[in-house]
């Protein structure tokens, strides 16, 4: 940036398909975004592979693809065991854009960007966002930042205080509105206090709300029993996002270069596959033969799965915060009751999967995994090719089964019906 270079402001809206914004903007309900698109340029970019928040924000901030950042998921494969902890910036290769700008002597600010913990000690304010460990006290820089911010803005929250549940939408929306208000107010405070040359603020709640309430927008969704237009609460939230953007835009110098973007899009998913179940069926993943494992397998075959128990807990409203607090698959107690990697006969297992949303399959490689079963080189290539062929065959048969049952029934294979929404590859917005 030269001396006269304009300042740069980036506003991230996590997980928002451009079509959703365009539809509402054209209908006149998002005036700030409508004006922004009229004045500027709009278009799609491809997201990362996989197109989920962890890899895509890491790629955005470093300019490197996931093969180079090393961030493929929210979890990573820890060397020497079969434990998959959450990723953080210490796992990432590549400098974040705010660090590069700060190192060049400019003032940079970063507010609520996902996968930004531990924070960079930059010349300017930084507050990490989603994937900051629950209860972390070192999620910001400089050290005096939060006390000063909270004195102006009130208690700062990274995470929402409510999770969506049917019949509970009003409280959920009120909590989401409060989080948005806190974020907007914090962004305005940091812009004033630090006058940064570069500033980014990300709203992660757009992703969370669309995940949890997509069925409000889609009358054909399996959760829906009526075809009424129930889009109002989601649309009203986006109207508040639009008003938040208007407030931030009104606050910055008109010469500022402004980019509004998302990290990936979203859509309905009526089926999903649990890849480890499929790997068990194909024999690539093998269970131990001991009695506790076989007893759990019997229960598993009758539907006593962690997912089903979560679903019941969710319906009863018991799963509040569970997604954040249980720490993704790492809760050891659950593994005593359900089939897990503890029950795997690793020396006879060639492949396994871990991660969330977009499954990745890993080979169980001799010399890399502690009880590897596949030799690097020719055997690795052969097993990998075998998995590719099995996956193609599975997809063809699942497609046939869906067609036979009108697209609604369980495929009869390892795919399960779902009420959740998978991330939809490949929609990005850049202005
Ligand atoms: Zn995302």
Image (spheres, helix red, strand yellow):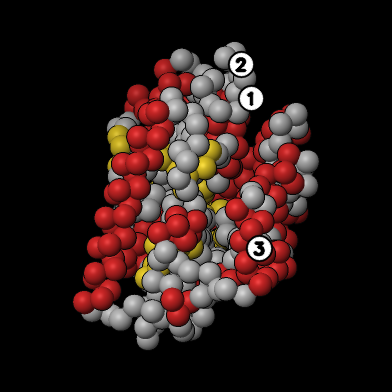
- Please tell me whether mark 2 or mark 3 is closer to you in this view: 3
The front one of 50 and 115 is: 50
Residue at disc 3, secondary structure = helix
In the picture provided, is 295 more to the left or to the right than 345?
right
Residue at (35, 47) in percent of width and height: 394
> Is any atom of residue 136 visible in this view?
no
* Neighbourhood count class around disc 1 (C-alpha, 10 Å): few under 14, some 14–19, many 20 upward: some
Residue 21 x, y percent position in the rendering: 44, 28
Considering the numbered disc 1 on the image, is that residue within a helix, a strand or a loop? helix
Residue tagged 1: 233
- Left of 105 or right of it: where is 244? right
* Residue wearing tag 2: 226
Q: Nearer the viewer, mark 1 or mark 2?
A: 2
Disc 1 within 8 angstroms of ligand 1 (CB)? no
Whether label 2 lies within 8 Å of ligand 1 gets the answer no
Q: Which residue is mark 3?
A: 296
User: Image check: 10 left or right of 2?
Assistant: right
Which residue is rendered at x = 34% and y = 78% of the image? 374
Residue found 78% across the figure and 47% down from its top: 318
Mark 2 and mark 1 in contact (Cβ < 8 Å)?
Answer: no
Q: Tell me if residue 106 comes above or below residue 223 in the rendering.
A: below
């Amino acid at each position: 940036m030269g001396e006269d270079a304009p300042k740069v402001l980036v506003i991230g809206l996590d997980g928002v398909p451009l079509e959703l914004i365009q539809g509402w903007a054209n209908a006149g309900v998002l005036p700030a975004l409508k004006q922004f698109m009229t004045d500027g340029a709009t278009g799609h970019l491809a997201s990362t592979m996989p197109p989920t928040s962890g890899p895509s924000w890491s790629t955005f901030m470093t300019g490197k693809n996931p093969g180079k950042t090393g961030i493929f998921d929210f979890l990573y494969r820890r060397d020497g065991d079969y434990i998959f902890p959450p990723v953080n910036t210490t796992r990432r290769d590549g400098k974040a854009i705010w660090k590069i700008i700060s190192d060049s002597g400019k003032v940079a600010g970063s507010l609520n960007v996902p996968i930004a913990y531990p924070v960079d000690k930059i010349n300017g304010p930084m507050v990490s966002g989603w994937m900051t460990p629950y209860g972390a006290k070192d999620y910001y820089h400089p050290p005096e930042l939060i006390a000063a911010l909270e004195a102006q803005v009130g208690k700062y929250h990274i995470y929402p205080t409510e999770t969506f549940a049917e019949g509970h939408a009003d409280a959920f929306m009120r909590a989401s509105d409060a989080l948005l208000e806190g974020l907007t107010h914090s962004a305005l405070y940091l812009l004033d206090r630090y006058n940064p040359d570069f500033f980014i603020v990300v709203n992660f709640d757009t992703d969370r709300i669309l995940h949890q309430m997509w069925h409000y927008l889609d009358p054909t969704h399996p959760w829906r029993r009526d075809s009424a237009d129930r889009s109002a609460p989601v649309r009203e939230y986006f109207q508040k996002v639009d008003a938040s953007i208007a407030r931030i835009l009104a606050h910055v110098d008109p010469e500022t270069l402004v980019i509004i973007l998302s990290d990936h899009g979203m859509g309905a998913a009526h089926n999903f596959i649990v890849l480890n179940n499929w790997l068990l069926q194909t024999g690539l993943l093998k269970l131990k033969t001991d009695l506790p494992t076989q007893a759990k397998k019997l229960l598993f075959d009758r539907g006593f799965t962690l997912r089903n128990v979560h679903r019941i807990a969710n319906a009863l409203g018991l799963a509040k915060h569970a997604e954040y607090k249980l720490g993704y698959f790492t809760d050891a107690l659950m593994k005593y009751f359900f089939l897990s990697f503890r029950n795997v006969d690793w020396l006879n297992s060639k492949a396994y999967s871990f991660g969330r949303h977009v499954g990745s399959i890993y080979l169980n490689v001799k010399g890399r995994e502690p009880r590897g079963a596949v030799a690097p080189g020719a055997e690795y290539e052969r097993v990998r090719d075998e998995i590719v062929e099995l996956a193609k065959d599975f997809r063809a048969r699942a497609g046939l089964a869906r067609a036979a049952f009108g697209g609604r029934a369980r495929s009869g294979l390892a795919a399960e019906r779902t009420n959740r929404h998978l991330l939809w590859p490949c929609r990005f917005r850049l202005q």
